[in-house]
Amino acid sequence: MKLLHIDASALGEKSVSRTLTAAVVARFQAADPALEVLRWDLDAEPLPHLTAASLAQADPAEAARAQAALADFLAADVLVIGAPMYNFSVPSTLKAWIDRIAVAGKTFRYTDKGAEGLARGKRAILAISQGGVHEAGGASDFQESYLRFVLGFLGVTDIEVVRARGVNLSPQQRTQALEHALASLPAALPRAA
Ligand SMILES: Cc1cc2nc3c(=O)[nH]c(=O)nc-3n(C[C@H](O)[C@H](O)[C@H](O)COP(=O)(O)O)c2cc1C
């Protein structure tokens, strides 16, 4: 089995979402020592913004990284995505990754009946962190709703979410939110085959 581990937080070791993705990945590794982990740290090694030059594949090195991002996404059985809230949405580094994996003919296609996701059969676990409290689907949520929608568009509909909210409201709230999120992880444990 292959697991794609994605982080996007710019807060390094203090990151809540990185703490959560690491815990989720550790559970999967414990359950399957042969697990292959495909790692993309989008803060340490960001993908560039998608530009006209990217579409023209003007830079072979950039084109090769984009190909690798797409290949790892397609190869993964499980996606573990760390998604902090930045300005009510996801970090631009995570959006830049999405721009590389949403590829017509590879991960979705348009048919006479509408759009069809081609990346089916994957399971996704989203590790959501927020400084404030933004309910999924609420007026200020362009983070979880967006990720659910775009992954669904690509055919990934088996999505679980681990959330730590209000982490900047107070040190106590941060500790509680992280503890609560970690305690909720059993729901995200590897499932029996
Ligand atoms: C650039 C930036 C923008 C942020 N924007 C928001 C925001 O719009 N709403 C919010 O509730 N928290 C916001 N925060 C707080 C983060 O969501 C919070 O610190 C969260 O823990 C970040 O995830 P991380 O700890 O994994 O980095 C922002 C933080 C940063 C650094």
Image: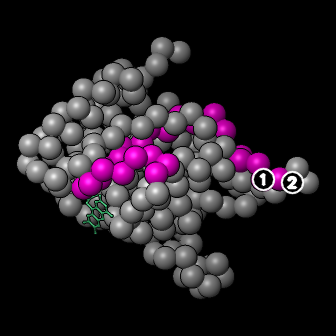
Residue 127 visible: yes
Image position of 88 (left or right of 57)? left
Q: Is residue 61 above or below residue 6?
A: below
| Numbered range of the magenta stretch | 114-138
Q: Residue at x 46, y 19 (%)?
A: 191
Identify which residue, 68 or 106, lies in the foreground. Answer: 106
Reply above or below: 148 against 23: below
Does dot 2 land on a helix, a strand or a loop? strand
Residue that lies at the very extreme toward the left in this rendered image: 171
**Residue 80 relative to residue 107: left or right:** left
x%, y% of residue 63? 56, 72
Q: Amino acid at mark 1?
A: Ala
Q: Which residue bears the numbered disc 2?
A: 111
Query: Which residue: 23% across, 49% down?
Result: 166
Pointer 1 residue: 115
Name which residue lies at 58% across and 58% down: 101
